[in-house]
Image (tube, rainbow, N blue to C red):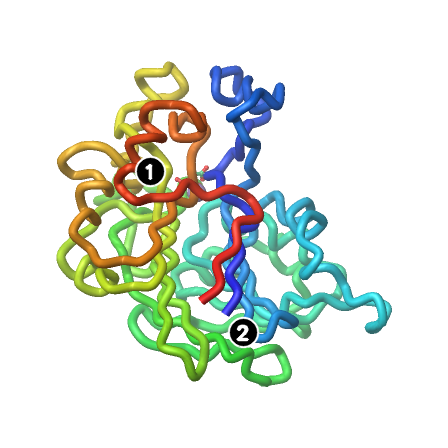
Amino acid sequence: MIVKIIGSAAGGGFPQWNCNYHLSRNARNAENGFLARTQSSIIASADGKRFVLFNASPDIRQQIQNTPCLHPGADGPLRSTPIAAVVLTNADVDHIAGLLTLRERQAFNLYATKRVLDVLDANPIFNVLNPDLVKRHILPLTGVTAICDVDGNPLDITLETFVVAGKIALFMENAADENFGSQDGDTVGLKIGQTGSNKTLFYIPGCAQVNVELFERVKNADCLLFDGTLFHDDEMLRAGLGPKTGKRMGHISMAGEQGSLRAWQDAAINQKIYVHINNSNPVLDDHAPERQMVEKAGWQVAFDGMEIIL
Ligand code: MLT
Ligand code: MN
């Protein structure tokens, strides 16, 4: 199985369009050690020809352009794409806005939980994906799904879906409800596998907490792509970038007693990679002490174009 991280930043990207924080400024100026990154998305393929796109970021057009294996085949039909299926892990803007770019009468299968599909169903703009061509499929909250193209041909990629602690999409929040109206299925994690192989890759770009159940599920994985949004829970407040903590946004931080570095330190995971990295996170500076700290703990910080072969 080939897995490629085509977008390694969180919502807003790196640099973020309106941000003058030193990290975004340095990335904008292409300073040494500040690699620009597009918004959160990965692709996987069993055969190197047909791909599953996980999360459709607002940067999908640029990501396709940057990724030759996602280009329409030169000797294929006039309109075509190697993207045979799209899977969503939540309904955040950085994970669904790219669906609007995938219009132009292109057929593919779209998979998400009922909670996430309900968000798309409630927003008629997503009907630009012609329902005759783009088939929506419900992912169970727990269980295995064999991913197929629209004609029902298996892509030999299987998904095991599971609920993780998280939050409803920002634009769906209801302040009057507990945890803003979040329910199971608003955020899921995925175990991605290839038919006939026992290699396992977990993709969990949004997660508020690593509980015992999650730890036990993932602890022997070959590869974990995990929520790397923030380093410190209050880093956005401290930097004057915004009023929200990581907890408020449904994201665990890297540092601290409750952080992800601590949570995964005793796991026997072969390869641990932080994805969905926010433009406030100091690990985006290749030379920062925080970057050295996560690397010393056995983590890699994802960059666009990073490839994992399992
Ligand atoms: C998140 O991951 O918390 C969201 O992408 C935030 C947002 O919607 O901008
Ligand atoms: Mn996000």
> Dot 1: within a 10 Å radius of its alpha carbon, few (fewer than 14), some, or many (20 or more) residues?
some
* Pointer 2 residue: 46
Label 2 element class:
loop
Quarter of the image for residue 230 reads: top left
Quarter of the rendering occupied by the C terminus: bottom left
Q: Any mark on residue 236, and which? A: none
> Dot 2: within a 10 Å radius of its alpha carbon, few (fewer than 14), some, or many (20 or more) residues?
some
- Is 73 situated above or below 256? below
- Is 202 situated above or below 294? below
* Pointer 1 residue: 295
Frontmost residue, 135 versus 241: 241
Q: Hey, what amino acid is under mark 2? A: Ala
Residue 192 position in % (x across, y down): 41, 68
Q: Give the left or right position of residue 27, taking residue 229 as reference.
A: right
Label 1 element class:
helix
Residue 217 position in % (x across, y down): 22, 65
Q: Residue at x 65, y 71 (%)?
A: 49
Frontmost residue, 84 versus 194: 194
Q: Residue at x 29, y 71 (%)?
A: 142
Q: How many marks?
A: 2
- Is 64 situated above or below 146? above
Quarter of the image for residue 274 reads: top left
